[in-house]
Image (cartoon, helix red, strand yellow):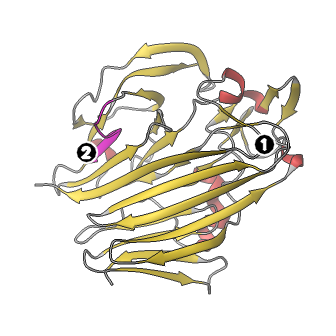
Amino acid sequence: MAFIVSINKDEIFPVITLKDDAADSSVEIYSFGALLNCFKIKDADNVIDGFTSPQDAMANITNTFKSAKLSPFVCRVENGAYVFNNTAYKIDKFYLGNEAIHGLLYDANFSIVKSGADRNHAFVTLEYNYSNDKEGFPFVYTCTVTYTLESNNRISMKTVVTNNGGTPMPVCDGWHPYFTLGEKIDNLLCFINADKMIEFNDKLVPTGNIVEFKKFQQQEILGDTILDNCFLLNKNQQAACVLRNPVTGLALHIWPDTTYPYLQVYTPPHRNSIAVENLSAAPDAFNNNMGITILNAGESAVYTTRLQVVIES
């Protein structure tokens, strides 16, 4: 069997490894937050800027939100407040300034509900049942995340959100990984499959305007470009984003499906890695409704994105 699943239960929470023995590629996943912490291929280092240990993840998740699952909202909710079905709510979790950020599940303890491997892939399914009305989201839902490692150094991340309550609920979904390709990001080639982006105000909240975006229409050196922007992906067959180290040829391709029409890209001040975030909705969607999903009682929504890491000549 080329593919293997192993689960380490000796840590403070389970750590799952998916491995392709034939290709010598592997994925490490934390059940804490359903975080993707490592993705390595043969002859290359980890392309995920992750945590050094489970203890590091638990202590520092809110410093960077590395690989955080963004649910039930993405990015920001302005002033942490929103109105749904004529009822006002106030988020009571993590704030950056006056804005609630990055959802409510980034530090959730997911359960392992299924795992397996055969000649073609290895996978693990993680699940969290949310029902905390004290956090400003008094809805009951299940978030299920399945990671699958396949041949040719490809992984997929499939998220299913199911409304377990008796009334409609709003939901958005996203993912907040940081990527590193062995160089400062200034030296990387970057392609973004978008020619429009959402205009933000000084609080990084959408103004309602869509503006043109002219850079990185083909692979070009990132240089000193500073990004903290949300792009509207073009509807074509190209990858949403490509990052490439021109010296080593190590390249990352990101392929979301149509349920992730937005791409948030953030260049942190240290410039050692870059956040490329698949989003089902725009920031502050609980207020501006850009891409928001409304699930009726018993309904589910499915969101899928894929990564491929290769060494190109």
Residue at 43%, 66% in the rendered image: 38
Three-letter code, disc 2: Asn
Residue at 17%, 49% in the rendered image: 246
Residue segment shown in magenta: 236-243
Look at the image and say whether residue 19 sits in the magenta stretch.
Answer: no
Q: Position of residue 160 (x, y in %)?
A: 60, 52
Which of 127 and 100 lies nearest the eye of the viewer? 127
Residue at 22%, 36% in the rendered image: 219
Q: Position of residue 91 (x, y in %)?
A: 81, 39
Identify the element where label 2 is drawn.
helix
> Between marks 1 and 2, how big is the CA–CA gap?
48 Å
Q: Which residue is mark 1?
A: 297
Which of 267 and 310 lies nearest the eye of the viewer? 310
Q: Position of residue 155 (x, y in %)?
A: 39, 60
Q: Is residue 268 left or right of residue 137?
A: left
Q: Is residue 130 left or right of residue 281?
A: right
Which of 103 and 203 lies nearest the eye of the viewer? 103
Q: Earlier in the sequence, mark 1 or mark 2?
A: 2
Q: Classify mark 2: residues with Cα within 10 Å, few (<14), some (14-19) or many (20+).
A: some
Mark number displayed over residue 187: 2
The reply to whether discs 1 and 2 touch (Cβ–Cβ < 8 Å) is: no
Q: Picture quarter containing residue 108?
A: bottom right
**Residue at the front extreme?**
298
Q: Magenta residues: mostly which secondary structure? A: loop
Q: Position of residue 189 (x, y in %)?
A: 24, 41
Q: Quadrant of the C terminus?
A: bottom left
- Vertical placement of residue 15 versus 59, above or below: below
